[in-house]
Amino acid sequence: MQTIYSSDHRLHHGVELKDGAVSDSFEKPARAETVLKQVQAAGLGDVVAPHAYDHASYVGAHSERYVGFLASAWDEWSATGRSCQALPLVWPVRGLPSTAMPQFIDGKLGFFSMDAGSPINAGTWKAVSASANSALTGIDLLSRGEKAAFALCRPPGHHAGREYMGGYCYLNNAAIAAQRCIEQGAKRVAVLDVDFHHGNGTQDIFYDRNDVLFVSIHGEPSVSFPYFSGFSDERGIGEGEGFNLNMPLPKGTDMDGYEPVLQHACSAIGRHAPDALVVSLGVDTFEGDPISHFRLRTPDYLRVGELLASLKVPTLFVMEGGYMVDEIGVNAVNVLLGFEGRIQA
């Protein structure tokens, strides 16, 4: 299995507003570096750089004006004389009448954000576009006949909606890959999100469509970020009704509770009969993760990979969350080794 990786991710490391204070983000460069080292140590396969893609490759999953905002936000921010990282300070919440996009950067930041956890700095656009390009390169490998590929994306993407960033995410790598797969002629694609947090952005992008089935297994949203999406009654709208499947689980869920739900998710994907599967691979389901509360253990991830392999569908794994940096590499790679039927030494 080839791994697609770009060192440009190192250009982005931000701060976040959490627990009432601005502090260094849990989403940091060491995450991707740890996974890369484990990929190499496990002998998973070649590590390749992503191809270059233009902005139009991100439009479809996202709007043109949102992609344009991300590409220009730092220049607009720094043009005001500020050199600190850009964070929003006001959001268009319920009750405010205007739905028009602001013209000033402070307003744009709030307009295109869901939280204060996704700052923009001088290297952010290059990092997030390289991350998306990694996913696009991975889906192109599948189109050329590869059984599977691993896009080692950073920053992650599944919280980024059609027109908003948030949860450390800017471009929705998994959704961009799924959209490209459809554009290349696939009739049906499935996106399975196994990150602890609900993939609200992916849901937003495909909620009214029946060509992409979105399935998410995640923490109960009433007590888990992102709080405002991920409930089981969110089933899609219009042509997309019935093509959105949320499977929230309670605090403390271990593999005994997780595995039958994953099996149910695989059954739903099998019924969809996709031409390709995109897996939003978050390993913040690990028992020691600092911002999550499931209790999967390192050997459990081998089983996750085995179950996904049973679908026998060309599969792109796209790296999402996982914040226990010492273990993220072995846990993520265990999924891939399980998928390939290999046992890690």
Image (cartoon, helix red, strand yellow):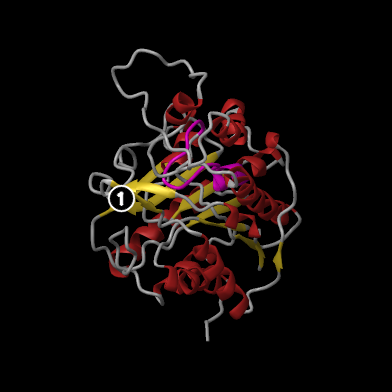
Front one among 213 and 293: 293
Horizontal side of 236 relative to 342 (left or right) equals left
Determine the residue located farthest toward the front in the rendered image: 81
* Residue segment shown in magenta: 162-178
Quadrant where the image shows the N terminus: bottom right
Is residue 337 located in the magenta-colored stretch of the structure?
A: no
Q: Secondary structure at mark 1?
A: strand
Residue 323, picture quadrant? bottom left
Q: Which amino acid, by three-letter code, is at mark 1?
A: Pro
Residue 303 seen in the current view: no
Mark 1 lies on residue = 248
Residue 278, percent across and down? Answer: 56, 52
Residue 146, percent across and down? Answer: 71, 61
Horizontal side of 133 relative to 195 (left or right) equals right
Q: Is residue 128 above or below residue 344?
A: above
Front one among 23 and 30: 23
Residue 317, percent across and down? Answer: 56, 58
Q: Is residue 153 above or below residue 73?
A: below
Q: Residue at x 57, y 53 (%)?
A: 277
Residue 74, picture quadrant? top right
